Amino acid sequence: MESLLDGYPISPSIHDELLGADGVRPPCERLASEFDRLGVDEVRSRAAYLASRYVDSGVTFDLGGTEKPFPLDIMPRIITAPEWSTISTGVAQRVYALERFLGDIYGTGKVFDDGVVPRRLIVTSPNFAREVAGITPANGVRIHVAGIDLIRDGEGTMRVLEDNVRIPSGVSYVLTNRAAMAGAMPDVMRQYDVEPVDIYPSRLRAALEAAAPAGVSEPNVVVLTPGMYNSAYYEHSLLARTMGVPLVEGPDLVCQQGRVYVRTTQGLNRVDVIYRRVDDEFLDPVHFRGDTVLGAAGLVSAMANGTVTIANGIGNGVADDKLIYTYLPDLIRYYCGEEPVLPNVDSWRLEEPGALEEVLDRLDELVVKPVDGSGGKGIIMGPECTREELDAARVKLRCDPRGWIAQPLIQLSTVPTFVGDRLQPRRVDLRPFAINDGDAIWVLPGGLTRVALREGQFIVNSSQGGGSKDTWVLADRGAAEHDSVPAIQLQTVSPEVPMSPLVGTEPMEKPDRSVWEAQQGQQQQTRQVRGGHDESADEVVKPC
């Protein structure tokens, strides 16, 4: 029987996750066999079913103003239980260190006094929010949800590419990919014991409820969205629906006497926790952009009063700065007292002595990234640049060395992807999602695998023609379930605050529609230019 892997190219410098030098890797043998059993015509038919299902379900993304179905490749990615154990432990370790770091820099600043991170590095970050300095969250948690981007290098080592603890996006595709694959490939999925992912919404809601202000026994949680014109609106609505909580927009919220309420048909209902999908600068016109219509005046004051929790925390973006990324191994040693489980990609800080000149000299072989960039925007891929582009890049780096880091070009691992009538190698990365409830950090078994569908492409985001794969973490039923990290040390919180009942309603003032729509789109543009982290599948994916 002809195999879909006939003629599949193998490169000695690239780690392929299905095929090795000795043939199909043992965990993937049944997968390869099942695809050969189905044959080209049947695989093509099922791939078409996946695409049509996403169109019918509205699982789309915006590409140049056109809504397109988010590409889901029919070949899943397999991760074994032992490997996932390492990944999940490393991700949890990293989130724990970042949580401690954020509490430190917005608190006593001991990390500065001990010389681990320069204070100047933090105060010069455009994402450092002085407005929340000294404010302690209700249960000591600032990172309720994290997305940690991972890649596998040419030797097969899993490395961290970057951290996303501001408004990490993409988990909706993890959930919808699994549902779609269960419909398209049930016979193949039955060959494996795959860890489920549908527990995520209940875990997220439990963590949000655990973050409620002191004294609240039955927390009211809402999801705050910029609105239907935001490219990640599908995710916002999906999470609100699966958690069973209201989806609200800025004009739905009102702040009175230091508390936050949501307008309902029965009046104003108290809000205890806001899972916000709105950037810091659009949250509160009193403290940030005065012209915002995406948030509500008084949110920051209510948070400071201890009557509402905003998740993820305001000011988390400072931890996403790629310069902070270069300090993460030291921060893990400092806060955890252990070595990093998952290594970084080697990086140059251009402000350090000799680093800038070395990078400028080797620019044609390196990747240079803006420290506050996202979505692959502004990245300089040295090996792909012309001489004129490299000369222009050198000018940028000399003018602003603090604004850039440099890394070697990593050969991302590949996974077979159905292209035409054959399986072809395409580069992938992985974004696992972690939830922190204040007692433990739980990592969703799987994550969003993003794949560059174009041959030779490094950038895997959908705006560059990329797609995704369902990530199958194989279960180890013999292993006892346990938390990856110890409980986070909680800080002193405000004394119990009595909660008020429902109060009367009031007329709702609608903002100008054109301003409203423009700001929903502008929020995404701001992330691309100033470095906010992704709110759409189009923005969540990074090159190496």
Image (cartoon, grey):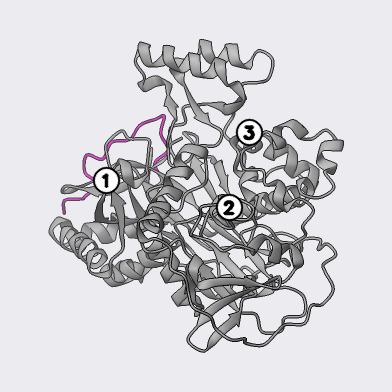
Report which residue position mark 1 lands on. 64
The residue at 31%/63% (across/down) is 59
Q: Earlier in the sequence, mark 1 or mark 2?
A: 1
**Which residues are the magenta region?**
1-16
The residue at 43%/53% (across/down) is 519
Report which residue position mark 3 lands on. 323
| Left-right relation of 131 to 167 | right
Q: Earlier in the sequence, mark 2 or mark 3?
A: 2
Say which amino acid is labelled 2.
Asp
From the viewer's side, name the closer residue of 125 and 281. 281
* Element on which disc 1 rests: loop
CB atoms of marks 1 and 2 within 8 Å: no
Discs 2/3, front: 2
Q: Give how far across and how far down residue 109 sits, in percent.
A: 82, 43
Viewer can see residue 480:
yes
Q: Give how far across and how far down residue 51 sits, in percent.
A: 22, 61
Viewer can see residue 436:
no
Quote the CA–CA distance across marks 1 and 3. Answer: 31 Å
The residue at 50%/30% (across/down) is 369
Say which amino acid is labelled 1.
Gly
